[in-house]
Amino acid sequence: MTALQASHGVNTDVLVNGNVVSQYFNSFTLSPTRDKAETSAFKQLFKSYVAGMIDVVATLEGLFDSSNSTAEDPLLYAYLTSITAADNQWFYAPTGAQGVSAQGNAAWAIGGLSTKYEIKSDLKSANTVTAEVQVDSTAGGLDRGFILSPWATQSAGGNSSSVNGGAASSNGGVLLVHAFSDTASLVVNLQDSADNSTFANVSGYTVSPTNATISAYRFPAAGTTPTGTIRQYTRVTWTGTGTFLAFFARK
């Protein structure tokens, strides 16, 4: 029997569109549910069902801060009130996403619409906020994967350590890069290997963040179904410089 590897919530990291926002929140709840349709008939003892579509809502709670343009309040207010109601790329890492020790941590890529932003003031408490994100298939939905390169500033090209996927897979995957405003000529490539020794670029899985722009980048684009074989071990390489995080989820 494998021993439980418990972790503490204080290590949680949250990013959105290239911004680290962990410092503004103290609670994050990811709630996937699945529709079902009843197919019960006469003579059955137990009800029967067929599975339907998946619905996911992420709920964030934390402290109100409007002190600068990348603080929680201006970001969440803009996401909620955008006339175009654009989808946003959230990233949730319960065991952390920053520093060398975060390499290989499980995490969730969350693409969806901001549907709630609530501010609460109380005489005896600090000002607090609650926000909700409705996961949307056109934004990429929900993907569980692993951090290949944790959030860090890279001053030269290099490569991450590898993650063992257990076996090769045949349905492609999602490469996600959250990049900060200090990026310069950054290009991130996904590589795979059958033996954890000889690696090669996975065709198409290349992300080129726009210089000096805070944003999140996906391949394939949100709403596009991934394809192709991914060998057992994966890592990323990069050229250029900047602060970023790279994540990969197999399909």
Image (tube, rainbow, N blue to C red):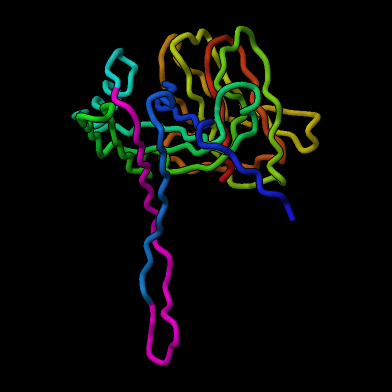
Q: Is residue 18 above or below residue 225?
A: above
Name the residue nearer the viewer: 153 or 141.
153
The image shows residue 88 at horizontal and vertical percentages of 35, 31
Magenta stretch bounds: 39-64
The image shows residue 132 at horizontal and vertical percentages of 31, 39
The residue at the point 63 percent across, 8 percent down is 156
Residue 51 colored magenta?
Answer: yes
| Left or right, residue 197 beside residue 160 | right
* Residue closest to the far front: 124
| Left or right, residue 199 beside residue 238 | right
In which image quadrant can residue 41 be found?
A: bottom left
The residue at the point 55 percent across, 37 percent down is 8
Q: Is residue 89 above or below residue 165?
A: above
Number of callouts in the render?
0
* Residue closest to the far bottom: 43
| Left or right, residue 194 beside residue 119 | right
| Left or right, residue 126 beside residue 185 | left
Residue 101 colored magenta?
Answer: no
The image shows residue 20 at horizontal and vertical percentages of 44, 22
Residue 84 visible: no
The residue at the point 30 percent across, 36 percent down is 131
Residue 109 visible: yes
Name the residue nearer the viewer: 79 or 83.
79
Q: Is residue 55 above or below residue 125?
A: below
Q: Can you say which quadrant of the picture contains the N terminus?
A: bottom right
Name the residue nearer the viewer: 240 or 36.
36
The image shows residue 65 at horizontal and vertical percentages of 30, 20
The residue at the point 45 percent across, 43 percent down is 142
